Amino acid sequence: MTTRGCQLLLPCLLAGWTAGCLLFTDAINNAPSVAITVQQDGQDANSLVRSKTAYFTAQASDPDQSTDSLQFDWYQGKTCDKALAGSPVPNAGHVPFPFQPADLGTGCVAVVVTDNRGATATATLKYEVVDQAPVADIKILPAAGQTDPVDGQTYPLALYSELTLSGADSSDPDDVQPTPIWHVYSADDTEISLPGCPDNSKGPYVCTFSTETPGAYRVKLVVNDNIKTSTAEQVIQVAEDQLPSIDINSAQPLPPTSPNQPPRLLSANLDNSFTINRVVDDGDPYPSSDSLHPSPVSPAGFVWYFRYDQPGAHFDRWIGDSPIFTIPAGAFLPEESIQVRVEYHDRVTACQPMTADCDAVIQACDPNATICYSIDHRAQWVTWTVVFR
């Protein structure tokens, strides 16, 4: 300050500019202003979901300097007071501030903006982390030969067949792995226990469904994230037991298609084997797809008989359930004529309806028939006429 004509500040101020006084003062610093917005998954909201990154943006301005030159310090805590009392979030500078909520409940994010002359502005934003329900999903994974599933429709399943259901596509919007629980209900809505649901050998998300009882079944998958649950259901219609059918074209040697056709000519001095290569059966297809257990499951299987081809002769049972029947060399003499019969029984009514030896089944049909079905439609047999030479 100059002092010509003015020795003190007060006189100078009183004298004004005309007294030859000049007064210098600091420029006024305007504090910045700031507000916070939040965005998660493209939606602005104060309700956040777990495990997904939210972005907090500081909308700041300062009349005295550019926004880029301001200092931003971010804070986070359960309450706004605790947030501001803590340490700033490391390496969080200018907008946006990323945050991934992990714990459910309320929280607060705060930002303190400081200009280059030390003036500050503070903004806080309260939020709530909410739980989203998981989504249960059941998918049918059909095996070879099984029907392709149609969403929302009952799935048809042959008796004894195994069906794989997977809940692996179940999910949780919060990226929390939901826990699966399987339930199986019969047609009268009674919950039943099936060892394959879940299939412990394949994991908790796999249900291997199999039953020996026809009817409608409802399989329900419940998934939960320890707070909320979701369910999915699949109805399975297990068919009644069906008539097994020997594939005649795969039998060796090929049996006659009618009694009027000439018999098989076989050598009496050689082993002669009769083989069934394939059986079409809803429950026990042969050969089995399981290479370690190629035979049909007991008591299903084959019963072999033979008798002399002459009036009054009766069939004698050949013990065994193999699809191969071998007449050893020398068992019959040249020019002798016999009939060889194989009988196939499925799993439910093998050797029904009367005797353990299954003779009653044969008696239910014309013994001279080449191909015959039992009266209960559960067994089928094929007869070869053989002449030795």
Image (cartoon, rainbow, N blue to C red):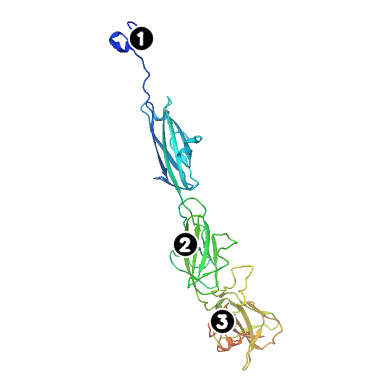
Numbered label attached to residue 232 = 2
**Is 348 or 199 nearer to us in this picture?**
199
* Residue 101 shown left or right of residue 297 in the figure: left
Q: Quadrant of the N terminus?
A: top left
- Asked whether residue 76 is in view, the answer is yes
Residue most extreme to the right: 330
Report the residue marked by disc 3: 379
Task: Inspect the image, locate mark 2, and give the three-letter code of the amino acid beneath it.
Answer: Ala
User: Does residue 367 appear in the picture of this structure?
Assistant: no
Q: Which callout, 2 or 3, points to the residue nearer the camera?
A: 2
Between circles 1 and 2, the one closer to the viewer is 1
Disc 1 crowd, CA 10 A, few/some/many (<14, 14-19, 20+): few
Q: Quadrant of residue 278?
A: bottom right
Three-letter amino acid code at the position of disc 1: Leu
Q: Residue furthest bottom?
A: 312
Q: Position of residue 37 (x, y in %)?
A: 40, 40
> Does label 1 or label 3 sit earlier along the sequence?
1
Dot 1 or dot 2: first in sequence order is 1
Q: Position of residue 209 (x, y in %)?
A: 54, 67
